Image (cartoon, grey):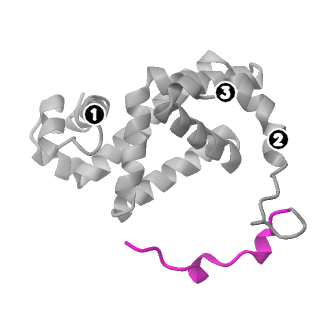
Amino acid sequence: MGNREDLLRGAKQCLVERGWARTTVRDIAAAAGVSHAAIGYHFGSRDALLTRALVEAVDELGDQLAGRAPGGEPQERWQALIDSFTTHRALWVAQIEAVVQAERSPEVREHLAAGQREARDGLGGSVPLALLSGLMLQWLVDPEHGPSGADVVAGLPSALDLPETGHLPETGHLPEADHLPEADHLPEADH
């Protein structure tokens, strides 16, 4: 294995053991058995290396999960994903940490956005990815009450019939995309 591969392996190990925020350049170099200068040479920065390692680790997990319930019933496929929130908890937490880092790092944001595009393709669109993200948060925060794969599939029809809350137009339907404000016309967030 070369330094680049060693660094990726070391970064994956650090993400699981220390998390994104607590992993230092020295930690990665020590886990990889290489000089910390190699990080800059091969990846440019710690964040670029951690992002690449996270994307690869999630891809590897996706490959594992695909083998667990290939072509199975929808609730079995969702349950395989849900089970990974426990068996690979540290990896999912590292993803949450990376998202927080992306708020202040265009480099991390760019890499994570590319990873999300890949995930959309792998999951079949933006809605399954949004569902996966919401499930992940529920399971990481309150695993005793997180939904099962069967709950997810059973709840989808009711999720499509949104309750009237007074926040939707009188029709009870969400506005069409061409009636939503453009992103550049939205108010700026306070930073």
Q: Nearer the viewer, mark 3 or mark 2?
A: 2
* Local SS, label 3: helix
The residue at the far right in this view is: 171
> Residue 168: which numbered mark, if any?
none
| Left or right of 176 in this view: 5 | left
Q: Nearer the viewer, mark 1 or mark 3?
A: 3
Residue 153 x, y percent position in the rendering: 77, 30
Residue at position x 30%, y 35% in the image: 15
| Left or right of 186 in this view: 54 | left
| Left or right of 1 in this view: 113 | right
Q: Which residue is mark 3?
A: 78
- Quadrant of the image containing the C terminus: bottom left
Q: Amino acid at mark 2?
A: Ser
* Local SS, label 2: helix
Is residue 55 placed above or below 16 in the rendered structure? below
Q: Amino acid at mark 3?
A: Trp
Could you tell me what secondary structure mostly forms the magenta stretch?
loop
Range shown magenta:
173-191
- Residue 125 can be seen, yes or no: no
Q: Residues within 10 Å of mark 3 (few under 14, many from 20)?
A: many
Task: Indicate whether residue 174 is drawn in magenta.
Answer: yes
Q: Which residue is mark 2?
A: 158
> Residue 5: which numbered mark, if any?
1
Contact flag, marks 1 and 3 (Cβ < 8 Å): no
Residue at position x 43%, y 59% in the image: 110
Is residue 81 placed above or below 163 in the rendered structure? above
**Residue closer to the observer: 131 or 117:** 131
